[in-house]
Amino acid sequence: MPAIRAHLARVLPRVRGHAARGAGVDAHKAERAATQRAWEHCLTDCAVRPSCPKMCGTDTEACLPKCYDNYRPMVASLEKIYERVQGLDAA
């Protein structure tokens, strides 16, 4: 996950000053979490064939979240490969 965190740090602005208090921090954290989820879903749908929406068909409420959860370790592995290839690892 460090690769996506590094990417998010570049893409999303940091909350500073008065906006960093209270609801500003919560909103910022919620936005970052939503971006991470969207990234995981996008990467899963690109790498897995058929994609989760195709596999689940019309049963999106029960099936879709479970499908993405099942592929979360695969996303983490791909992120580690990306970090290594891009030279982002701290080794």
Image: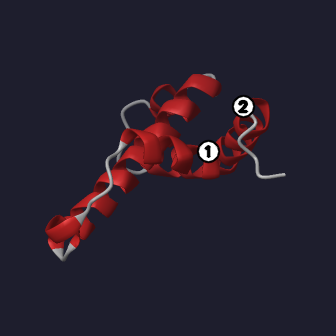
Residue where numbered disc 2 is placed: 86
Decide which of 2, 54 is in the foreground and name it. 2
Whole-percent x, y for residue 62 in the image: 41, 51
**Element type at mark 2:** helix
34 vs 5, left or right, is: left
Earlier-in-chain disc, 1 versus 2? 1
Decide which of 34, 52 is in the foreground and name it. 34
Residue where numbered disc 1 is placed: 3
Whole-percent x, y for residue 61 in the image: 35, 48
Q: Residue at x 64, y 42 (%)?
A: 75
Give the residue type that dot 1 points to. Answer: Ala
Decide which of 11, 71 is in the foreground and name it. 11
Please name the colour scheme applied to the rendered image: secondary structure
22 vs 6, left or right, is: left
Q: Residue at x 53, y 50 (%)?
A: 5
Q: Residue at x 52, y 51 (%)?
A: 66
Viewer can see residue 64: no
